[in-house]
Structures are given as structure tokens and as C-alpha cells.
């Protein structure tokens, strides 16, 4: 009853977990996430400013 699609997904998640265990990868991920969120907030704010 083992679905090959689920097994593939589990392997990918395990690979992500092992790379995220390294401190420098976690810091890069958090910086990228912060920059992405900041860009989204700025884009939203600019969109709101144009509609007003």
C-alpha cells in the first residue's frame, strides 16, 4: 500500500531537512524570506497608493 508518489515526496522533504540543518542554509533561507516578504509589502503598498 505504499504509494510511489508519497515515497518520492518524503525523499524530497528529507533532503530539504538535511540541507536546512546547516546553520548557513537556515540564515540564507531567513534572509531570502525576509526580502520576499518585504517586496510583497512594498508591492501591495504601491498598488494601494495607485488606486487611491
Image (cartoon, helix red, strand yellow):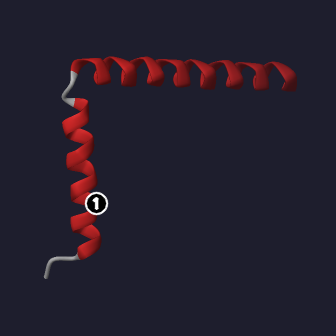
Q: Position of residue 41 (x, y in %)?
A: 61, 21
Residue under the point 19% across and 38% down = 18
Q: Left or right? Give the position of 14 relative to 28.
A: left
Farthest left residue? 1
Farthest bottom residue? 1
For the N terminus, the quadrant is bottom left
Q: Is residue 39 above or below residue 10?
A: above
Residue under the point 33% across and 17% down = 27
Q: Position of residue 5 (x, y in %)?
A: 29, 71
Residue under the point 57% across and 18% down = 38
Q: Quadrant of residue 20?
A: top left
Q: Left or right? Give the position of 3 relative to 49.
A: left
- Mark 1 nearby-residue class (10 Å; few <14, some 14–19, many ≥20): few
Q: Quadrant of residue 3?
A: bottom left
Viewer can see residue 46? yes
Q: Nearer the viewer, residue 50 or 2?
A: 2
Q: Position of residue 49 (x, y in %)?
A: 81, 18
Q: Which residue is mark 1?
A: 9
Q: Nearer the viewer, residue 30 or 46?
A: 30
Residue under the point 45% across and 24% down = 33
Q: Position of residue 6 (x, y in %)?
A: 25, 67
Q: Assign a secondary structure to mark 1.
A: helix
For the C terminus, the quadrant is top right
How many dots with numbers?
A: 1
Viewer can see residue 52? no
Q: Is residue 48 above or below residue 5?
A: above
Amino acid at each position: 500500500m505504499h504509494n510511489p508518489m508519497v515515497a518520492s515526496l518524503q525523499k524530497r522533504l528529507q533532503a530539504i531537512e538535511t540541507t536546512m540543518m546547516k546553520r548557513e542554509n537556515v540564515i540564507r533561507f531567513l534572509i531570502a524570506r525576509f526580502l520576499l516578504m518585504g517586496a510583497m509589502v512594498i508591492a501591495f503598498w504601491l498598488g494601494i497608493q495607485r488606486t487611491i
